[in-house]
């Protein structure tokens, strides 16, 4: 799945592009979206507004939840970064990876040369037993229980998946699967594919893209 898919769904329809741009700023009700469309395009019927919103929903680019009696529409987290790319909208880049011994933010310049963008924030997944043994200044540490860290992919997946969804609201996540436990690395790799994120690892003295 790629930005070509988004282009096919939008199909040059200005209303669909406007809806996506608005939802990148946060969830909105159908009434709010219609009002926003009218502000951008002039008077527009309820049928046209909901038809185009429906097309985005059917394609999986938009999800819906309920808040009291209202339906709230949001960008699907799995498409969030690809939609930003498609619309040319940039947000700060955050590094997400497991921790073993090397501190990635000390490699900031090397990572910038490889990724092509400055990294604004570092997020490290660390096993709980390292909490008081490693001073990782300059990074946000997410600690997981040792039994999960060294357990199965299915065990480590839920907390990392929630982390990815939370951080995607603010950052473009770039995932490094070089370090961490095997379950952590496998979970991160799967989530990179599921959420359309860039993913790389360091091997044989150089960084290589696994998903660009």
Image: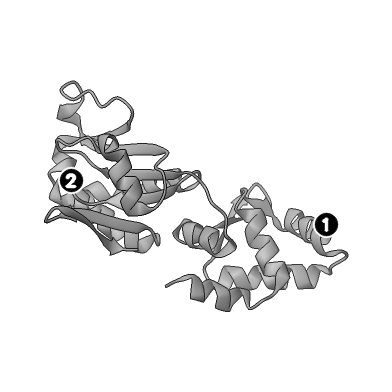
Residue 89 vertical position relative to residue 41 in the rendered view, above or below:
above
Name the mark on residue 39. Answer: 1
| Residue visible at 17% across and 42% down in the picture | 149
Residue 203 vertical position relative to residue 2 in the rendered view, above or below:
above
| Residue visible at 84% across and 68% down in the picture | 44
| Residue visible at 56% across and 78% down in the picture | 8
Name the mark on residue 141. Answer: none
60 to the left or right of 127: right
**Mark 2 residue element:** loop
Closer to the chain start, of discs 2 and 1, is: 1
* Mark 2 Cα shell of 10 Å, populated few (<14), some (14-19), many (≥20): some
| Residue visible at 18% across and 42% down in the picture | 148
**Mark 1 residue element:** helix
Residue 159 seen from this side: no
Q: Which residue is mark 2?
A: 179
Residue 28 seen from this side: yes
Q: Position of residue 67 (x, y in %)?
A: 63, 47
Q: Position of residue 113 (x, y in %)?
A: 33, 50
């Amino acid at each position: 799945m790629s930005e070509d898919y988004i282009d096919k769904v939008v199909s040059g329809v200005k209303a669909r592009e406007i809806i996506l741009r608005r939802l990148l700023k946060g969830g909105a009700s159908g009434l709010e979206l219609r009002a926003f469309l009218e502000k951008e395009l002039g008077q527009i019927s309820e049928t046209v507004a909901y038809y185009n919103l429906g097309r985005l929903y059917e394609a999986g680019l938009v999800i819906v939840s309920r808040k009291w009696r209202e339906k709230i529409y949001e960008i699907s987290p799995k498409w969030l970064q690809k939609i930003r790319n498609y619309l040319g909208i940039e947000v700060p880049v955050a590094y997400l990876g497991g921790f073993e011994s090397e501190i990635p933010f000390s490699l900031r310049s090397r990572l910038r040369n490889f990724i092509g963008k400055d990294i604004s924030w570092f997020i490290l997944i660390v096993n709980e037993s390292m909490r008081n043994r490693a001073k990782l200044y300059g990074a946000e540490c997410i600690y997981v229980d040792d039994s999960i860290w060294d357990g199965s992919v299915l065990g480590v997946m839920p907390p990392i998946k929630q982390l990815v969804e939370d951080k995607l609201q603010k950052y473009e996540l770039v995932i490094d699967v070089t370090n961490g436990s095997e379950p952590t690395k496998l979970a991160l790799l799967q989530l990179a594919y599921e959420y359309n994120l860039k993913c790389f690892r360091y091997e044989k003295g150089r960084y290589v893209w696994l998903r660009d």
